[in-house]
């Protein structure tokens, strides 16, 4: 059972299709109901058995945590616990730092960052209890490099990386896995929208690499969620992370011991 935020368009919709093709039950989360229904119809064409369902939830993932928590609870009651959550809802706005409205910084932070925190927070307890789960975050290449025109966007995508890495250290002992995707420019409705206001410099920088197809990006994201690949930096970091993970495990054992002691006391 998979839940995909931003599953009604672009990369999120392609991720949903990719997972549906593998027999998963899908919950789509986005705001616009027409787009959700449209996507549902499209995804259902790829079913591989007649038990599969696509459930649509209309909610703004960036506004009210209790609302997000409620709808996720309802979805889990209908379909059962979520095994994989893909946080793909997001948006991009660009412009020079001094030209961007202050409200744009707030908006991108709440949609891209808090919009990934809330759904994750809503599913994590059940995942830890079940000792099963995957959470996928969708950052961006602009979440690894700060680029001209992306002062608001890049920082919201860098934030996702910090969240994901910290969360991974917490949930690893519970067999819950976290992955982050850093996609390049991808041909989606959101990308077309973003291009309407892109500064020239940003456009020229973007054009140095080619635009990907959302189907291709989605395939890679689903694959990476299952098979983890590594870069050089990651390998060095892994040495440290290993020792940090053992601290986490030690604390867990210590806590379990003292809980037993409390009970017997
Ligand atoms: N396309 C690209 O070039 C790249 C995109 N990305 C990232 O990938 C993700 C998907 O991008 P893309 O497919 O292009 O985007 P689209 O604009 O095509 O789709 C965005 C999806 O997110 C939903 N969404 C947006 N805001 C909210 C919200 N506040 N609450 C709930 N749902 C919301 C939209 O539905 P609705 O509007 O109805 O709510 C829609 O389903 C984003 O996080 C983006 O930053 C990363 C790198 C490159
Ligand atoms: C290890 C990293 C390698 C980096 C290679 C250099 C890439 C420079 C070009 C970057 C293009 C900007 C992508 C942003 C996409 C995006 O998030 C928006 N389209 C959102 O919609």
Image (cartoon, helix red, strand yellow):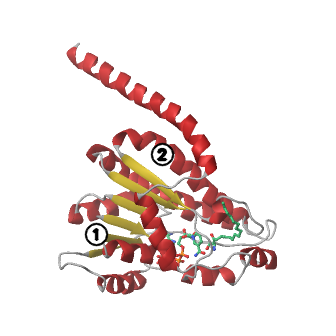
Whole-angstrom CA distance, mark 1 to mark 2, is 25 Å
Using the rendered image of the protein, determine whether residue 105 is visible from the camera's viewpoint.
Answer: no
User: Please, which residue is most extreme toward the top here?
Assistant: 265
Viewed as shown, does residue 140 lie left or right of 22? right
- Residue tagged by mark 1? 24
The residue under label 2 is 167
Question: Callout 2: helix, strand or loop?
Answer: helix
| 134 on left or right of 88 | left
Residue in the picture at 32% in, 49% down:
127
Please state, as top left, top right, bottom left or bottom right, where the N terminus lies in the image: bottom left
Q: In the image, residue 196 lies at what x, y percent?
A: 69, 84
Tell me if mark 1 has few (under 14), some (14-19) or many (20+) residues whose alpha carbon lies within 10 angstroms of its own.
many
Residue 96: which disc?
A: none
What is the x, y in percent for residue 44? 29, 83
Q: Circle 1 — which element?
A: loop
- Measured along the vertical axis of the image, is residue 83 above or below residue 239? below
Task: Mark 1 vs mark 2: give the one in front.
Answer: 1
Residue placed at 33% from the left, 45% from the top?
A: 128
Please provide percent x and percent y for residue 19.
35, 71
In the rendered image, which quarter is residue 47 located in?
A: bottom left
The C terminus appears in which quarter of the rendering?
top left
Q: Who's the residue at 41% across and 42% down the image?
A: 172
Residue 249 in view: yes
Say whether disc 1 or disc 2 marks the residue closer to the N-terminus: 1
């Amino acid at each position: 059972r998979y839940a995909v935020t931003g599953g009604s368009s672009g990369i999120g919709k392609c991720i949903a299709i990719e997972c549906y093709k593998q027999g998963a039950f899908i919950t789509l989360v986005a705001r616009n109901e027409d787009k959700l229904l449209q996507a549902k119809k499209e995804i259902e064409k790829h079913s591989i058995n007649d038990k599969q369902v696509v459930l649509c939830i209309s909610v703004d993932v960036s506004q009210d945590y209790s609302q997000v928590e409620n709808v996720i609870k309802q979805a889990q009651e209908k379909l059962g616990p979520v095994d994989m959550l893909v946080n793909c809802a997001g948006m991009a706005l660009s412009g020079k730092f001094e030209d961007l409205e202050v409200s744009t910084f707030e908006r991108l932070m709440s949609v891209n960052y808090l919009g990934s925190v809330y759904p994750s927070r809503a599913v994590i307890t059940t995942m830890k209890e079940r000792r099963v789960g995957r959470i996928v975050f969708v950052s961006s290449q602009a979440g690894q490099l700060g680029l001209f025109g992306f002062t608001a966007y890049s920082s919201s995508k860098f934030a996702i990386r910090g969240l994901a890495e910290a969360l991974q250290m917490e949930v690893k002992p519970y067999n819950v896995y976290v992955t982050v995707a850093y996609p390049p420019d991808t041909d989606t409705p959101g990308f077309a929208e973003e291009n309407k206001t892109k500064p020239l410099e940003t456009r020229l920088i973007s054009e140095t690499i080619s635009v990907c197809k959302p189907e291709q990006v989605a395939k890679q994201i689903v694959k990476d969620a299952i098979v983890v690949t590594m870069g050089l930096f990651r390998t060095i970091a892994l040495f440290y992370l290993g020792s940090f993970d053992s601290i986490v495990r030690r604390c867990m054992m210590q806590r379990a011991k003292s809980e037993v002691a409390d009970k017997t006391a």
